[in-house]
Structure formats: C-alpha cells, structure tokens
Amino acid sequence: MSLSPSAILKIILGVQIGLGVLLVAGDAAPAWQGLRLGPSAPRLDQPVAPGDQTRRYRPRDLGPGAPGAPFPPTGDMPARLVLSDVSIGGSDALRLVGRIAAGDGARVAEKLAERFEDADAPRRVYLHSPGGSVLDALDLGRFLRDEGIATALAEGDVCLSACPYLLAGGATREIDEAASVGVHQHYFGQSSVQPAFMAVEDIQRGQGQVMEYLVEMGIDPRIMQPALLTPPNEIYILLPDELRDYGMIEPVAE
C-alpha cells in the first residue's frame, strides 16, 4: 500500500527535526561525534533478511571489485567515477566504478557522450559505487535517461548511498541477486562546518530535489522512508521484493 503525500511529508519532517537536534548537539559537543547509543550494526558483508537489513557503512571497506567478485570486494575504491569497457554475460557494456565526486555529473556525461557518438557503443552501464555527491548522481542519472541508456548491477557489485539515484536514471534497470543496493540519510551542504539551521535548510532543499527526481524517473518516493530513517554511518540494504515494489528493477523487455 502506497503512503500518501501527507504521510511522506510527516516522515520527512520528523527526520529533519531529529537531524536538527543532532546537529545542534554536534555543535555544542564535538566530542560526541561518532557516539553510538546502541550496539553496532553488523558488517556490510553479513547476509540480510526481512527486518534485518541495516548494516555498518564504511566506504573504505569497499574496493574496485569486478564482475563475479564475491561480496564485498576489498581494496581501494577510486576517489571518483572511472569509466571502462567490460564484457558481462557475453555482451559488451560500460562500467562506472568509484565514488561519485563533486563534478562527476558533468565530467562523466561528457565522456559518455563522446562514446555514444559511435553508433556501436554499448548502451548499458554497470555500476559499482559507495555513493558520494547526491546532486551529481541526479545530474548523471538524468543524462542516462535522456540518452536511453540502461543501468545494471553485476554479481558482487554494490550501489550505495547516492548511487541508487544514478541507478534509477537507467532507461531499464537490472540488478543481479548477488548485488546490493542500499540507502541512508545524506549530507547535501558544501561544508559540514556550518550552523545547524543552515545544515537543515540544505537537507530540506536536497530532499525536495531527490523526491522530484524520483517521481521524474518513475520511482516510488516511498523508497525515501528507509533512507530517511537510516543514519549516515549505516546503510539499509533493499531486498529484491522492495526493489521491485519501488520500481527500481525495470528489466529489458523480451
């Protein structure tokens, strides 16, 4: 059953109030930063099940990975998106690996546009990213949708934090059952050192942009509910049934 717009707004308002309190507390007592009131969430590599989907989120634990690699990969994740050619399942494709850095939206879109000048260029992009800049993910997602490019996750890939918004931009979207898609709260401001009221304004503005984008991409905005309820140092892994329910899985028509 879909949540009504008023219910979604109540959820967002409640989370914003909570974030405001935490931000004020952070300004007053920096030493509290990182303090946890409950037990630590399980590691990201622990299997998830309905009702047990929140995992510890540390991007440094993720690595560049490869198609077919066991989850989670280990090593250093590129500091910004790296574009490469791959062959998955016998089909040529493109692959974006790394954090979504500020400026990656325009930079990667330009690189992809150059590739797509060749009529034979692959029209599917596989993703493996711990997230990063939300606004750049939205910009690049819109570019992919305008170009009719499919997005996908291969076995062992992760798409976390801001990455699901990039995934949502695909004209079609395929997610291997051994891949992981995760959401949580985001920071939208340019600086983490600012008064609490300014940080909350950034959060409100950013959430509005994300919700507008999700509706534009045909994704159910209910996906924001687990995202808003999961703190930035944790990640909520979406189950296949949730991905289908929210419209994130959109396979190629046969």
Image: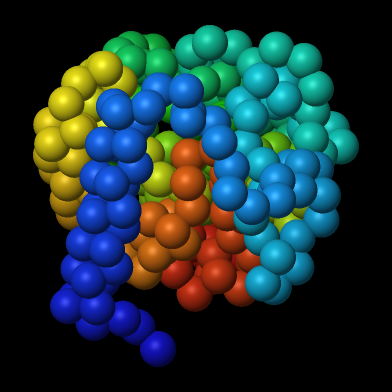
- Toward which corner of the image does residue 61 lie, by quadrant? top right
**Quadrant of the frame with the C terminus:** bottom right
- Toward which corner of the image does residue 246 lie, by quadrant? bottom left
What residue is shown at x 24% (from left), y 45% (from top)? Answer: 20
- Toward which corner of the image does residue 49 lie, by quadrant? bottom right
198 to the left or right of 176: left
Residue 113 in view of the camera: no
What residue is shown at x 26% (from left), y 17% (from top)? Answer: 193
Residue 37: image location, x then y, percent: 58, 49
Q: Nearer the viewer, residue 88 or 200?
A: 200
213 to the left or right of 187: left
Q: Nearer the viewer, residue 174 or 190?
A: 190
What residue is shown at x 70% (from left), y 46% (from top)? Answer: 40
Residue 45 in view of the camera: yes
What residue is shown at x 30% (from left), y 14% (from top)? Answer: 103
29 to the left or right of 240: left
**Quadrant of the frame with the N terminus:** bottom left
Q: Is residue 79 above or below residue 92?
A: above
Q: Nearer the viewer, residue 118 or 145?
A: 145
62 to the left or right of 25: right
Residue 133: image location, x then y, percent: 36, 26
Q: In this figure, which colouring scheme has been used for the structure?
A: rainbow
